[in-house]
Amino acid sequence: MKFEIRYMQRTVIIDALKRTDFGSEINVRGWVRSRRGNKNVSFIALNDGSTIKNIQIVVDLEKFSEEQLKPVTTGSCISATGILVESQGAGQAVEIQLTELEVYGTADPEKYPLQKKGLSMEFLRTVAHLRPRTNTFGTVFRIRHNMAMAIHTYFHEHGYFYFHTPLITASDCEGAGQMFQVTTKNLYNLKKDENGQIDYSDDFFGKQAALTVSGQLEGELGAMALGKIYTFGPTFRAENSNTPRHLAEFWMIEPEVAFIQKDELMDLEEDFIKYCVRWALEHCQDDLEFLNQFVDKGLIERLKSVVDTEFVRLEYTEGIRILQEAIKNGKKFEFPCNWGDDLSSEHERYLVEEHFGKPVIMTDYPKDIKAFYMKLNADGKTVQGTDVLFPQIGEIIGGSVREESLDKLNDEIERRHIPMKDMWWYLDTRRFGAAPHAGFGLGFERLMLFVTGMQNIRDVIPFPRTPKTAEF
RNA sequence: GCUUCCUUAGCUCAGUCGGUUAGAGCAUCUGACUGUUAAUCAGGGGGUCCUAGGUUCAAGUCCUAGAGGGAGCGCCA
């Protein structure tokens, strides 16, 4: 069945700019970035989000009155139909000679907050509902989509299964930090037991529940059946962290792989990050060029260098030796760094940015500064953690070989007084068909920081959640 | 959470030692200009100097407290 009514099909601007069938009719729809001109001709720069580039719409003022064009202001939304032509101007190859204009939505120029220039990141955070319409944030969110696609593609092509781990959890020993409680109880009228403790038996889950801080433990359950899995979902930390690298709600990628050892884990970490960066270079050229020009002049060069560089693989003990050597040669650090200390960011930065000048995978940490589930080395003192440290960003990946021995895991749990009564299911993986396995967690927004060159993690996620901030 | 800096027009900022009517650029509005590219040029409008106290003859400026924001650190991805 055919419809009689002829209508103009919308062409997205990224496609419109590639068309060469000059003389044909075309329709584009989008938001006006600017309008300028004189009394004979008016130029509209239109953007529909499909690309960083605008299409230019040329209006002959003999055909359209100033009155008709009045609502076409920065921020307004229009549908423009016209003839596709080769541009007479220098800034673009194609443009549209307007024949028909429909204004979908106006934007009062006295009130619309986005101007053509001069907007700070801090200001744009206060208008996060509109900032996707700016060049910078359009770019960032297109790249964000591309990175998500790169991640799924990488794992899918390497035989991993996307495994969905729960966002609500009742185990409080994931060990990764403070949790947000989930409850349907009236917080002003809490039922207490005889000891004055809150009684959760009548709460929704019948026990204390919280938002997950990591899908790893459940991810291990998947790997112990499907072999290779990855998770990719939101993660929540209730830590009062106020830095450009922390969010209360962020997205994390956590692959978990059966039958691999430390070297293979490091190969995976390095190969995976390089794949994602290479994907950006191949699929996001226009957007990266924009960022390279306006946000971070060294961005593209740095991305290329990471793809081409072999990451340094450095044992913690050797790292401490290098740092102590540096101190001996006059380097000043605020914090001490003796064997057994956790490295602070100044130490990590020295190693990554000054000493090696490239990404470092640090391994074999003292067991007391790492999580209970990491595999103990033969020395009895260190565990097989494999963290990837990046310039500027610091820890972008936290990974480890997992301890598969039930006895050793139980010893560690006991030594740390970890409450495991709700975690019998995790230990079952070591009771029934235990397998050597390993995995890591990558902070999606930290990858985004690196790939975009943006300075603050709040500007690589559409609606950031941080302490005291849950607007939008 | 600790340390530190910031808050003046829609935006970005200047404002000297505490002293007359608080300024600039951009944006916006009006006008000019035969094709602009962050258009250009001329002119106009636009202020709770974050809030509340205090010191002083006099506070945008000094003091105290609070709110909001940034950065460094801690925690981590």
Image (cartoon, grey):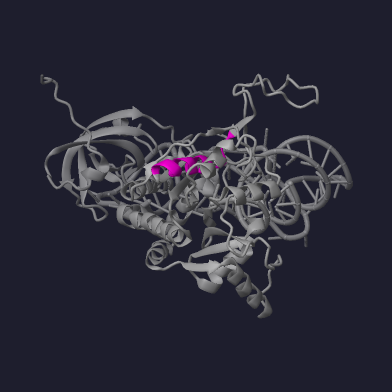
- Give the image quarter of residue A470: top right
A433 or B32: nearer the viewer: A433
Q: Residue A438, how many percent across, how many down?
A: 48, 52
The vertical placement of A360 against A22, above or below, is below
In the figure, is residue A7 to the left or right of A430? left
Residue A231 in view: no
Magenta span includes A197: no
Question: Residue lying farthest bottom?
Answer: A329
Q: Nearer the viewer, residue A123 or A156?
A: A156
Span of residues in magenta: A211-226
Residue in view at x 76 percent, y 22 percent:
A192
Asked if residue A43 can be seen in this view, the reply is: yes
Q: Determine whether A182 is above or below A152 in the image.
A: above
Q: How many marks?
A: 0
Q: Residue, x 11% and y 42% (percent of image)?
A: A23
Residue nearest the observer in this picture, A109 or A311: A311
Q: Horizontal placement of A306 versus A378: left or right?
A: left
Res B5 quadrant in image: bottom right
Residue A221 magenta-highlighted: yes
Residue B39: image location, x then y, percent:
37, 52
Percent of width and height locating residue B59? 77, 45
Q: Which residue sits at x=39%, y=39%?
A: A74
Does residue A170 sit above or below B44 in this rendering?
above
Quarter placement of the N terminus of chain A: top left
- Residue A26: x, y in percent? 18, 37
Q: Chief secondary structure of the magenta span?
A: helix
